[in-house]
Image (cartoon, rainbow, N blue to C red):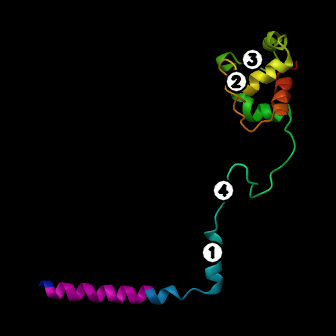
Amino acid sequence: MNLKMIAKWGASWLLLAWAGLAQGADSLSEAQRQAIEARIQPVGQLYIEGDQPATAQAGGERSGEVVYQKACFACHATGMLNAPKPHTDDWQPRLAKGMDTLVQHALNGFNAMPPKGACPDCSEAELRAAIEFMSAK
């Protein structure tokens, strides 16, 4: 085969492929088009801090037990890095410092515990409730 023949053959196939693609583009029914649009909808929306969220969020404070199960369990259940275990005497020397001191330690971090532990979205009241839950016998 010579170069001219290959070029003609390639151009013919490209023309046929383009014609087939162009014809198929308009062959979707309205139902098919709507189904495709529904499948490619965004799964979420972004917002900048300070803006209102795109969707409503459940309100109200979480209980101490809920906060503990969500954020505190990993360290406090095992005593990791000397974290006081729940419902034990580990809390007595800490409680002697006062609940307000413990809440400030939870808010701002203390020793190996980072600020707010593993719960960056917890309020001060929720952290207090978690401490009360863990320190109760």
User: Looking at the picture, which amino acid does disc 1 mark?
Assistant: Glu
Per the image, the residue denoted by label 1 is 37
Residue at 80%, 13% in the rendered image: 94
Query: Which one is in front, 76 or 103?
Result: 103
Q: Is residue 69 magenta?
A: no
Q: Is residue 82 above or below residue 19?
A: above
Per the image, the residue denoted by label 4 is 46
Mark pair 3, 4: CA separation: 38 Å
Point out the image quarter for the C terminus: top right
User: Residue 119: where, in percent of width, then height?
Assistant: 72, 34
Q: Is residue 105 visible?
A: yes
Q: Is residue 14 above or below residue 99?
A: below
Q: Residue furthest front?
A: 50
The quarter of the picture where residue 4 lies is bottom left
Choose mark 1 or mark 2, whichever is in front: 2
Per the image, the residue denoted by label 3 is 84
- 90 on left or right of 44: right
User: Looking at the picture, which amino acid does disc 4 mark?
Assistant: Leu
Q: Is residue 87 above or below residue 47?
A: above
User: Residue 52: where, in percent of width, then height?
Assistant: 76, 54
Per the image, the residue denoted by label 2 is 109
- Residue span colored magenta: 4-21
Callout 4: few (<14), some (14-19), or many (20+) C-alpha neighbours within 10 Å?
Answer: few
Choose mark 1 or mark 4, whichever is in front: 4
Residue at 78%, 31% in the rendered image: 68
Choose mark 2 or mark 3, whichever is in front: 2
- Assess whether mark 1 and mark 3 are in contact (beta carbons under 8 angstroms): no
User: Residue 71: where, in percent of width, then height?
Assistant: 73, 33
Mark 4 vs 2, N-terminal side = 4
Callout 3: few (<14), some (14-19), or many (20+) C-alpha neighbours within 10 Å?
Answer: many
- Assess whether mark 4 and mark 3 are in contact (beta carbons under 8 angstroms): no
